Image (cartoon, rainbow, N blue to C red):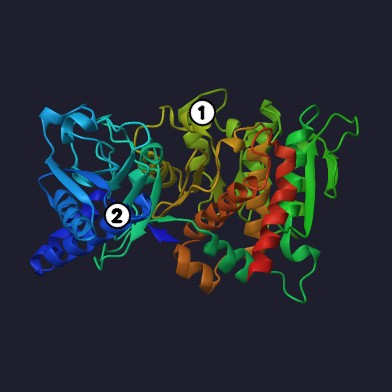
């Protein structure tokens, strides 16, 4: 995992460095790192023209140091102070000549208000220092007309605004550089491939004596006419390593069942909770909701299932709708809030999140997800361009996916992967607790965040255009297998 540190925490780190007399040295290192990144973008510096927009604070000082270093390396550098007189102007007007690279060292994470960025000509790259000016460092919100960067070199730790909101669209390639500044403790982290290696392929790897029930998943999913969702979830679980999927679905006696190796049983709606209790005794996770239907009888059974389950639960799709009772958000929160805490993960998309809370997401997605987690005493996975997963105390970000995942059924596959990983990895292992935290909800949030990361990474192996949910399960197995071979 990579730590992700808020703006206020970075300010406190800077204050401590200043008090210790270290700020000048840190600025020198940041300036050199900026110059090095610029040299990489320019493929050499001799004879190249560079323009630097420098602000009045440390961000501007980083840019000024970079300018001096680049001049020593043979570049011709002009430094212009940021101000209203250059707002929205073309780089040629600002510097009086053409440039090969524009360095944005105006304000970085410290910016407040609205910014009108200089206009970079076509073909001229932009390097942002720490944060593209005009992007809120905590939320990624665009404040005015921010600088659009091809690359952002950021220091000490990632900032939330580089990963959420509009931030990724403005930051370009993000380069993280250690300059010796201690950012302090943080409760936000970005999931990486290494998390998969250490958990799913480490702590969660199958042992020599494991058998199919060692990683069994109970799936409550599907209904007449909605078996596709159950199929996606079942295949997602099996391709992610579940040794057994016991599948229960409410039916009408037509005998329909999903395709695949899941052991499926059609159950009368009124008997669903009882059957789940029996099947779940030999399983290690419970996935509930995809394609289950939205009848009052199903909702009643779900309340019973969720209030009595002794194993971790991943609640998705129609399972979430059941607690909204047709859109009554107070009823949704109340229903989930009465469940036994510590073993529940909910996985809403934006619309479902609004239905559960009664309000649309604010600009602060991380804060919103954490607040809902605390309110309902469960882990929350909010799907999106950057997926946010939170327990009441910790948040994990996932940015491995992309627009290809915006296809029907992909979320059902994710639910299956999450169920498989929870069943495989298990709770309370020291190697998991050391990465995620000591509470059960911390561990659940971390494990399903790793599942979301694999979901995204697998999608990158698929078709650039036309990826469908049915492609994903096999791509998950393929990506995980490649990771094994790389070890």
Helix, strand or loop status at disc 1: helix
Q: Position of residue 39 (x, y in %)?
A: 32, 55
Secondary element under disc 2, as helix, strand or loop, is: loop
Image quarter (top left, top right, bottom left or bottom right) of the C terminus = bottom right
Residue lying furthest bottom: 208
Mark seen at residue 45: 2
In the image, residue 182 sits, relative to residue 392, either above or below, namely below
Asked if residue 243 is positioned above or below residue 411 in the image, the reply reads below
Q: Quadrant of residue 254?
A: top right
The image quadrant where one finds the N terminus is: bottom left
Circle 2 crowding by C-alpha within 10 Å: few under 14, some 14–19, many from 20:
many
Residue 11: assigned label: none
Q: Position of residue 306 (x, y in %)?
A: 61, 45
Instruction: Please state which of residues 134 and 410 is positioned toward the viewer in this rendering.
Output: 134
- x then y, percent, for residue 168: 40, 41
User: Residue 32's image quarter?
Assistant: bottom left
Q: From this viewpoint, is residue 220 visible?
A: no
Tell whether 460 sits left or right of 372.
Answer: right
Identify which residue is drawn at 20% across, 59% down: 69
* Tag 1 near tag 2, CB within 8 Å: no
Q: Residue furthest front?
A: 47
- Return the x and y of residue 54 as percentages of the image width and height: 15, 44
Residue 199 versus residue 264 in the image, above or below: below
For the residue pair 116 and 144, the one nearer the viewer reads as 116
Q: Residue at x 48, y 36 (%)?
A: 334
- How dense is the environment of label 1, judged by Cα within 10 Å: few (below 14), some, or many (20 and up)? few
Which tag, 1 or 2, sits closer to the chain's start? Answer: 2
Residue bearing mark 1: 351
The Cα–Cα distance between marks 1 and 2, rounded to whole angstroms, is 49 Å
């Amino acid at each position: 995992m990579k730590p992700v540190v808020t703006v206020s925490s970075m300010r406190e780190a800077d204050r401590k460095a200043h008090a210790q007399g270290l700020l000048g040295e840190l600025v020198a290192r940041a300036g050199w790192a900026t110059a090095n990144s610029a040299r990489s973008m320019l493929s050499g510096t001799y004879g190249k023209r560079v323009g630097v927009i420098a602000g009045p604070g440390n961000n501007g000082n980083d840019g000024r140091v970079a300018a001096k270093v680049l001049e020593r390396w043979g570049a011709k550098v002009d430094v212009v102070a940021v101000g209203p007189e250059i707002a929205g102007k073309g780089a040629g007007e600002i510097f009086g000549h053409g440039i090969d690279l524009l360095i944005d060292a105006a304000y970085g994470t410290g910016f407040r208000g609205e910014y009108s960025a200089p206009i970079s000509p076509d073909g001229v790259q932009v390097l942002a220092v720490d944060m593209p000016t005009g992007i809120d460092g905590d939320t990624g919100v665009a404040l005015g007309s921010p600088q659009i960067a091809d690359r952002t070199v950021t220091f000490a730790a990632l900032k939330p605004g580089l990963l959420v909101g509009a931030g990724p669209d403005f930051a370009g390639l993000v380069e993280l550089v250690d300059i010796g500044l201690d950012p302090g403790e943080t409760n936000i982290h970005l999931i990486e491939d290494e998390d998969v290696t250490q958990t799913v392929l480490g702590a969660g790897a199958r042992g020599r004596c494991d058998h199919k029930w060692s990683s069994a998943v109970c799936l409550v999913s599907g209904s007449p006419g909605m078996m596709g969702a159950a199929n996606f979830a079942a295949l997602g679980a099996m391709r992610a390593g579940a040794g057994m999927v016991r599948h229960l679905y409410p039916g009408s006696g037509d005998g329909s069942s999903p395709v695949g190796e899941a052991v499926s049983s059609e159950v009368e709606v009124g008997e669903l909770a009882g059957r789940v209790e029996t099947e779940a005794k030999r399983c290690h996770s419970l996935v509930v909701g995809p394609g289950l239907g939205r009848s009052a009888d199903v909702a009643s059974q779900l309340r019973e299932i969720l209030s009595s389950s002794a194993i971790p639960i991943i609640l998705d799709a129609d399972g979430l709708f059941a607690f909204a009772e047709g859109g009554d958000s107070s009823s949704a929160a109340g229903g989930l809030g009465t469940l036994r805490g510590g073993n529940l993960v909910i996985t809403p998309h934006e619309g479902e999140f609004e239905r559960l809370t009664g309000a649309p997401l604010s600009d602060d997605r991380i804060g919103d997800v954490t607040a809902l987690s605390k309110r309902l005493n469960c882990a929350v996975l909010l799907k999106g361009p950057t997926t946010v997963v939170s327990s009441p105390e910790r948040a994990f970000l996932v940015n491995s996916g992309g627009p290809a995942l915006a296809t029907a059924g992909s979320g059902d596959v994710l639910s299956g992967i999450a169920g498989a990983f929870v069943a495989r990895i298990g709770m309370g292992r020291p190697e998991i607790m050391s990465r995620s935290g000591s509470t059960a909800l911390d561990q659940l949030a971390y494990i399903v965040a790793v599942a979301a990361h694999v979901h995204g990474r697998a999608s990158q192996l698929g078709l650039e255009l036309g990826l469908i949910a049915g492609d994903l399960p096999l791509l998950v197995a393929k990506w995980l297998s490649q990771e094994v071979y790389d070890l």
